[in-house]
Image (cartoon, helix red, strand yellow):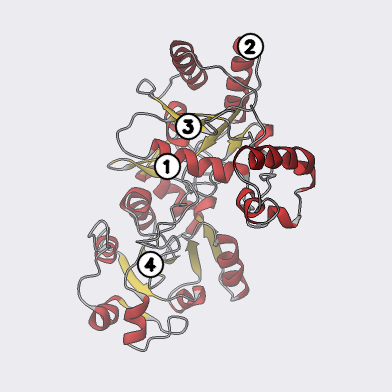
Amino acid sequence: MRYFGTVVRGVRMPVIKEGDDIVSVVSDTLMKAIDESGIKVCDRDVIGITESVVARAQGNYATIEQFSKDVRNKMGSGTVGLVFPILSRNRFLEMLKAIASGVDELIVQLSYPSDEVGNPIISFDDLDNNHVNPYDRVFTEKEFRDLFGKDLLHPFTKTDYVRLYSEAAPNIKIIFANQATAILKYTDKVICGDIHTRARTKRILKEAGAKVVLGLDDFLTSSVDGSGYNQNYGVLGSNYASNGKIKLFPRDSQGTVDAIQKKMFEKYGKTVEVFIYGDGAFKDPFGKIWELADPVVSPFFTSGLIGQPNELKFKLLADTTFANLKGEEARIAMTEYIKSNKSKTKDAHNSLGTTPRNLTDLLGSLCDLTSGSGDKGTPVIYIQGYFDDYTKE
C-alpha cells in the first residue's frame, strides 16, 4: 500500500524584487527543484505562492503621502472618525499615520476587550471584575486607563498599542466603544477600519445618519500620483514596507496563476492547481488571535480550487461501520466503501464532522503555516496528494 498521503514542501526562491517576472521566477525555480529532487508531478498537485512576493514583483506600493492625499480628497476637511482598526504595527501603524495626515482631527474608536482579529487590549475577566457591559459603555483613553490600568500590553509583543496609536500623530484622539454609532457624537464623516465586518459597519453608520462613510477598501482603488493600488480591496491586506511606505495586496493576478499552470502542463503534461495566498484562516488557542488580517485568504486561484472538500469521515467509519474489523481486513473494507460511496458524501451522515470550508481557505492555512512570515525563504509551497483519498495507490 502507499504510506505517504499529503506531502507539503516549502520551495526556496531567489530574492524577488520589484519588476521581476514572477511567472518565470516561480516556474523556473520550482521546475529545477522538482527535477533535481526526482519528484513525479501529478494531476491536482497544488502550487501556493505567497501574496507578498507577487505584490513586490508588481511594485504595488504606496507612500504615506499618496495614501494621505486620497484620504483628504475623499473625506474633506474637519474631524474624521476611524472605527474598529486592528492593532498591528505591521498591518496598520503606517496607514494610521497616513489617515491622520490627511485629516484635521482624527477620532480613533477602538473596540474592546480586543480588536476584530482578537488582539487583546484587556481581558474578559477585566470586564467582569469591573462590572463593565462592553456593549453600552464608552470610554475616553484616560477613563479606560484609570479603570483597567496604565499599561495595556499585548501578551505577545508587549506593546501598548493604545499608546502607540495615540502618539502616532498629534491630531489623534482615542475612544473605546463597541457600537459603531458612538463615533457620531464626534463627527458624521467616518472611515471603517474593520476588515471582515466592514459591510455591516458601513450599513449601520449610514442608517444612523453619517454623511460620509468609507472603508479601507475604498482608498487607493486607483493610482494616486503614481502609487500602487488595488481596485477590489483598496488598502486592505496592506503590510509595512518601510518607513513611510506600505505594500498593497496584489492585484490583477489571475493571469499569473493561469500562466504558471500552463507552463507546468507544457513541461510535465499534468494539470496542477495554482493559487496566491495571504494569511491563513486559523486561530491561536493561547492568545485567542485570529490570523486572518487579509480581506481573503486567496485573491487568485485556478478553477480546480473552487469549492469545498468532498470527503467521508474516516474515523467515524472506523468506529461504526467497521468497528468489528482489524488489520488488512479493515483496510480492504474501508477502501471498497470509499470507492462505492464517495459520490454520496454530500450531506450524508458519514461525512459528519468533515470541515465545511473552501478549498482555498484550507490550503491557504496549510501554506501559511509552512512558509511562515520569518526567514525560511520559502514563499512558494508545493503540495502533493492533497486531493487523494485512502483508495489512491
Closer to viewer: mark 1 or mark 2: 1
Closer to viewer: mark 4 or mark 3: 3
User: Residue 28's x, y, as percent?
Assistant: 48, 14
Left or right: 256 in relation to 235: right
User: Where is 117 relative to 114, above or below?
Assistant: above
Disc 4 marks which amino acid? Val
Instruction: Give the spatial CA distance, label 4 vs label 1.
Output: 32 Å
- Pointer 2 residue: 266
- Pointer 3 residue: 8
Q: Which of marks 1 and 2 is nearer the N terminus?
A: 2
Q: Earlier in the sequence, mark 3 or mark 2?
A: 3
Question: How many other residues sit within 10 Å of disc 4, few (<14), some (14-19) or many (≥20)?
Answer: many
Instruction: Give the spatial CA distance, label 1 vs label 2.
Output: 30 Å
Q: Quadrant of residue 125?
A: bottom left
Q: Which mark is residue 108?
A: 4
Left or right: 241 in relation to 309: left
Q: Considering depth in this image, is 239 or 189 the residue closer to the camera?
A: 239
Instruction: Give the spatial CA distance, label 4 vs label 3.
Output: 42 Å
User: Where is 132 relative to 96, above or below?
Assistant: below
Question: How many other residues sit within 10 Å of disc 1, few (<14), some (14-19) or many (≥20)?
Answer: few
